[in-house]
Image: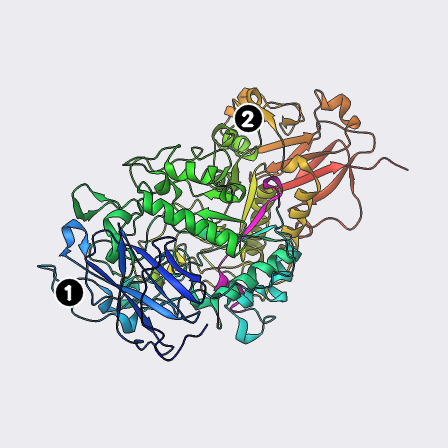
Amino acid sequence: MSSSKTAPDVRLEPGHPVPLGAHLQDTGCNFAVFSPRAARVHLCLFDDQDQPLGEALPMHRTGDVWHGYLSDLPPGTRYGFRADGEFKPSLGALFNPNKLLLDPYAVALSGPFEPNRCLYAHDASDLTCLKPCPMDSAPHVPKGLTPTPDTFDWQSSPAPNVPWSDTVIYETHVKGFSQLNPSVPEHLRGTYLGFAHEASVAHLQALGVTAVQLMPCFAFMSEPRLAHLGLTNYWGYNPVSFFAPDPRYAIDDAVTEFKTLVRALHQAGIEVIMDVVYNHTAESDLLGPCVSQKGLHGPWFYRHQQGDFSHFIDNTGCGNSVNLNEEITLQLVMDSLRHWLQEYHVDGFRFDLAAALGREKWDFSTRAAFFMACNQDPVIRHSKLIAEPWDIGRGGYQLGQFPANWYECNDRFRDTLRRFWRADMGVMPELANVLMGSRDALNKNAHSSSTSLNYVTYHDGFTLHDLVSYNDRHNAANQERNLDGHGNNLSFNWGAEGATDDAIIADHRQQIKRNMVATLLLSQGAVHLLGGDELNRTQQGNNNAYCQDNDISWLHWDQKDGPFQHFIAQCIDIRRSSTLFRNLVFDAPAHSDAPVTTDAVHWYRNDGYAMEIRDWQNPHTRCLGILLSTDIRNPAINLHQCEEYYLLMLNSGGHACTFTLPANPHSGWKLEFDTSKNNGLRPEQTERIKRDYELTPHSLVLLSRCEPYA
């Protein structure tokens, strides 16, 4: 996008106070910004070299909104605001006309935000008595770009509209996904267009995922602390704008290129879910940068102690908390969500620290204004909504407390699977619960599917390969004395810490990974995979690589099309082939107590008899069989009447286990896969199994209905 190099008509007409932001009208642009306590607000225009276009233009005021209209203003013109008034930090008045402020509604930026000492409203060199900083921040602040007419060609690419029960999400980072991919042209790597490239899309299609969850694409800024250490906030969980895609990942035009990414994935039948951060911003606490909200209407936008703006309430661990209990802030977030759904055609959102969004005056509420607003909105309520169901504030863990149409990241599933497959004792009852969708917490209606989003690995933690390769975190590269990141990872290295040349250990690690992936993909609820796990990606033991924009975080492609990738694709294909793995609906009595009791799910000991209470309570029980079928009361007699059925057998113990099959149809059972054989891939020829099956240590086996003999 480009702007005029000469000053436009400088007459700022009154225009209109609504809508907020910059909006094309006729041949010009209307600007409106909320700033209740400002004494004056000026609109500043800039050319392509960031030089001012004439004098700052005083804006008109209607109530709490400052506004103005410029005719004959070219689309893509760079702009910002300067707000003047009292400088009383304890009251939230941080007005400093030396600071250029980004429009909170800016839909595009002239460049990425980088930390700079002049971005503070106060004089950061003297904190004994806060006083205004005299430095002009304009040369170091990316400008908003006035909108351009929307001429993007979506090429008749409809939204995939994948049902939740069929959803398999692949979480990844826009840059890290293609940065090292040799199949992507070098000039496109690490960009929106690199992600949209046919080689990127083909990999996702081959894997079989139905949705991509993109780590934050909102324009963001690294923390100054990281800049001083020579690091950067690679993950991007530090936004400065809720409307503009970050220019870092663009070659020329972030708006058009992000739309191109969405279009390419939609044409492949893959949904796009954005990981969004509405719980805090990069402006941090009182002593943090002042680049937008804080310099315009801080007391309305951020939570703070009553009557004392100098004391920010921090439920996020990032210095501030966005106050969605305030009407104008809630309006901005809702407008942002609709913007991404309508302008970019994204399919849903994963809300970072979502418990913070549900806080009323102090505590979380299941009927918070934000949830009510989302659920009544005709656009937002039909999108996929995912909660990270906690924050770090009082009463911050809220798994199962989000609205019925929201899915929730289920850490109980993660922890239980990790414990089970490293052979911890006493895990079996909770394993049965999470395999059926954690319905004790995540079945929100009397008769519905689980709203559990199951996962084993996420961006914040070990990769799957590191989970079986390290007992401890190795975060020295983060320069925090290895104190950052979670200390209880429920990981196990199986005999050596980190990389090893021991073939036995390496093979066993791969088997454990197959066990975890298979268990995940054959469980009730939706599925979340961490991008790169299929490529055996390692972060060298770093379980908090948020600041590693380098080889540690980027995906390596040397193991593309390897056996583990094919195993994951096989499991996704099996999951897709039968509703028994993804869409069992239980009535209230069936899921009132774990394990689930129903004629569609039967639980067995390795001797072929049904599990009893004593078996569930035995902490040494490490072998379990799960028979999934259409409703049938006595599988031992009537299983042959079912059109489809599966027997999933798990052995987390260190000894082989002979499993007596609980039912033996005349045609026998078909071996789908055994994680201890053939890299977990299907046998080349059909194997018919009868009577019993020998489970090797630490293995998972799936049997299915075998076609009758001809």
Asked if the magenta segment contains residue 670, the reply would be no
Residue 136's disc number: none
> Is residue 5 left or right of 200 when viewed as pictured?
left
Which color scheme does this rendered protein use?
rainbow
Circles 1 and 2: CB distance less than 8 Å?
no
Q: Position of residue 136 (x, y in %)?
A: 22, 71
Q: Which residue is mark 1?
A: 123
Residue 595's disc number: 2
Q: Is residue 229 visible?
A: no
Does 343 appear above or below 124? above
Q: Secondary structure at mark 2?
A: loop
Picture quarter containing residue 673?
A: top right
Which amino acid type corresponds to the residue marked 1 in the rendered image?
Asp
Which amino acid type corresponds to the residue marked 2 in the rendered image?
Pro
Picture quarter containing residue 389?
A: top left
Magenta-tinted stretch: 162-180
Disc 2 crowd rating (10 Å Cα; few below 14, some 14-19, many 20+) is many
Q: Secondary structure at mark 1?
A: loop
Viewer-nearest residue: 554 or 129: 129
Picture quarter containing residue 632?
A: top right
Asked if the magenta segment contains residue 179, the reply would be yes
Q: Residue at x 52, y 52 (%)?
A: 342
Q: Position of residue 624 (x, y in %)?
A: 60, 32
> Is residue 129 left or right of 188 when viewed as pictured?
left
Q: Position of residue 217 (x, y in %)?
A: 45, 59
> Is residue 528 left or right of 566 when viewed as pictured?
left
Viewer-nearest residue: 333 or 146: 146
Q: Is residue 454 visible?
A: yes
> Is residue 387 left or right of 649 when viewed as pictured?
left
